[in-house]
Amino acid sequence: MTDAPAPQRVPLRQTWPDEFVARYRAAGHWRGETFPGFLRARAHAFADDVAVVGGETRLTYGRLWAEAERIGAGLLARGLAPGDRVVVQLGNLPAFVAVVCGLFRAGLVPVYALPAHRLTEVAHFARTSGASAYVCGERYETFDYRSLARELQAAVPAVRHVVVAGDAGEFVALDALDGPREALPGDPDPQSVAFLQISGGSTGLSKLIPRTHDDYIYSFRASNDLCGIGRDSVYMVALPAAHNFPMSSPGFFGALYAGARVVLSPGPGPDAAFPLIARERVTCVGLVPPLALLWADAASRTTHDLSSLQVLQVGGAKLVPEAARRVVAGLGCRLQQVFGMAEGLVNYTRLDDPDDLVLTTQGRPISPDDEVRVVDDQDRPVPDGEVGHLLTRGPYTIRAYHDDDAANARAFTDDGFYRTGDMVQRLPGGYLVVQGRATDHINRAGEKISAEEIEDHLLAHPQVFDAAVVSMPDDFLGERSCAFVIPGDARPRPAELKAWVRGRGLAAFKVPDQIVFVDAFETTAVGKVSRRELRAQLRARFLAEQEAR
Ligand code: OOB
C-alpha cells in the first residue's frame, strides 16, 4: 500500500478575529486546555475510577489513557504523522472512545462518520478531509465494515491505512497496534483544530466542521454545569456516539471531563438501554424526540429500575409541547430540551426553569458571549416574539467550514455570524422556540437529510425525468421524506427507486420514505420556479389533498 498517492491536504484552520480571542480568553471561556491535556490529568487524578462501560468492558481512567497512548503510538509507528486525518466509523463501543482519545494523543485528526453512513458518504469525508486512514468496527448489525473499507480504498487510494476493531481480516487489528511512546508528540496548541465534525448537510453532501480544543472543551465544560454533571454522574450514550449531541452536550466528553462514568448503550431503544440504566445507575441520557416517546411509553411497563435517572435530555429535532408532557409523565425525571448544532451554538432549558419554559421552548444559549440575531429575509432584526432566521456567533461557533469557499460565502455573514438555517422565535429572557427550517432539509428523527442530495441520486435513475424531495409531517419521526417524481417513458416501481437510492451507497435513513408520481411540476407564468418554491408547492398541495380525503 506504500505506493498509494499522498492525500491532497488543505491546512486545517479555525480562527476568530483577535478581539474575540482576547474577549473569550478574558472571560475564562478559553483556558488553553487540550484533549490530551485533560485526559492525562483525569488519568492521574482518577486512575482507578471507571471511565467507560460498554459490553463486557470497563475501562478505568488510567486504562483509557494507557489505551490512548498505545493506539496513538501504534498509528505513528505504522507511518501516520501528526496532522494526518483519520475517518473513524465505530458503533457505541469502548473502542470508539479509546480510538478518538488515541488520535488526540498522537496529534491525529478524527473525522467522525456515523455507523449508518455508507460508501458515498464515507468516501466524501475521506476525500474532502484528505484522510490517510480509516478506523472501523468489524461489523455492526448486519453490515460488514471491512467490505466498506475495501471499497473505500479503491475509491480513495490516499486512504492507505485501515484499522479494524475486532476480526481485521487483511487489515490491521486495533488490538495489535503498538509503538514506542517516545514518538508521541507534546500537547497541541489549544487554538488548533482537534477534529472534523460533519454538518447536518443542509445543501448537498455534508460539510466538514473544524473544531478547536479551546472552543469544544469550553462547550462541554459549560454544559456540565447546566446539565448537572459532576464526578458522581453516570452519563449514558444512547444515540450514535459520533454525533455532536451525545459527544458534547454534555456528552461523553463532558462526562470524562468531570471524572464521571460513561455508559455506552449498544442501541438507542429501551430494550438495550433499560437494563443498563438499572445496572449502572445511569443519571443522565440524551435522546431524539421519537425515542423519548418510545422510552416514556416503555417505562410504564418495564420491570427495570429506572429510578436513578435524574435528567432526560431531548434534542436534535423539535419536541412539541404535547410530546414533552408525555415524556415527563412517562419517565418522571427532569426534562431538559437541547437545541444544538455541530457548527457550535447549543441551547438548553435550565434544570430549575419553570415547567412552561421547559415544555414549550428549546432553551437559551450556553454562554453569555453567544450572540443571537433573529432576522428577516433581508437580514434586518425582527422584534422579539416574531419568527425569523437565526444567526449566531460566539466562543464555540465556527467562523468557517473546512475548505469550502462557496458554502462559507452562503453560511456566514461578513461580520462572522453563522446562518443556522433555522427559523426561530425569541422570547423575553433569550429563550428560543424553533419553528422549522428555512432551507430544504428533512429532519427525520434527528437525522438530517438534504433534499438536493437525494434529488441528485434520483435524477441519476434512467427512468426519472425530474424529482423533488420534501419533508412531510410524521407522527412518529417528526418529519419523513417524500419524493415527488416525474417518470420518464416507463414508470419505475416505488420499491425499485428506493432500492436504487440505497444501491448508490447511501445511509439507509436517506432512502425516501414515500414516493409519489406526478405528471409535471407546476410552473409560474414566467415558466420558472425556484426549487425551494417548487418543493413548498408540492408539499402544500399534497397535504391539502390528503386533508380533503
Ligand atoms: C444536533 O446537531 P446537528 O448538526 O445534527 O443538527 C443541527 C440542526 C439544527 O440546526 C436544527 O435544525 C435541528 O438540528 N435541531 C433542532 C433541535 N436540535 C437540533 N430542531 C428543533 N428542536 C431542537 N431541540 O442536532 C445537535 C447538536 C448538539 C446538541 C443537540 C443537537
Image (cartoon, rainbow, N blue to C red):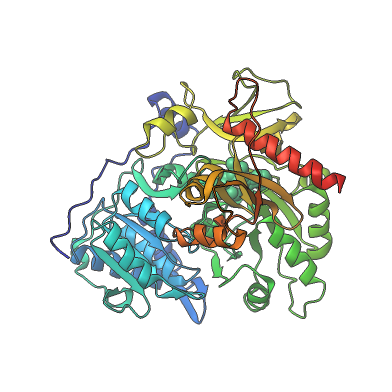
Relative to residue 481, is residue 142 depicted above or below? below
At a point 64% along the width and 51% down the height, the residue shown is 481
Q: Residue 3 vs residue 149: left or right?
A: left
Q: Is residue 222 visible?
A: no
Identify the residue at the far right of this view.
Answer: 548
**Quarter of the figure with the N terminus:** bottom left
In front of the other: 126 or 215: 126
In front of the other: 492 or 341: 492
Residue 191, picture quadrant = top left
Q: Is residue 362 visible?
A: yes
At a point 23% along the width and 46% down the height, the residue shown is 8
Q: How many marks?
A: 0
The image shows residue 248 at horizontal and vertical percentages of 53, 52
At a point 60% along the width and 62% down the height, the residue shown is 495
The image shows residue 119 at horizontal and vertical percentages of 40, 60
Q: Residue 233 vs residue 149: left or right?
A: right
The image shows residue 411 at horizontal and vertical percentages of 49, 31
Q: Residue 308 vs residue 248: left or right?
A: right
In front of the other: 316 or 353: 316
Relative to residue 538, is residue 444 depicted above or below? below
Residue 470, picture quadrant = top right
Identify the residue at the far left of this view.
Answer: 3
The image shows residue 317 at horizontal and vertical percentages of 66, 49
Identify the residue at the far front of this view.
Answer: 489
Q: Residue 11 vs residue 222: left or right?
A: left
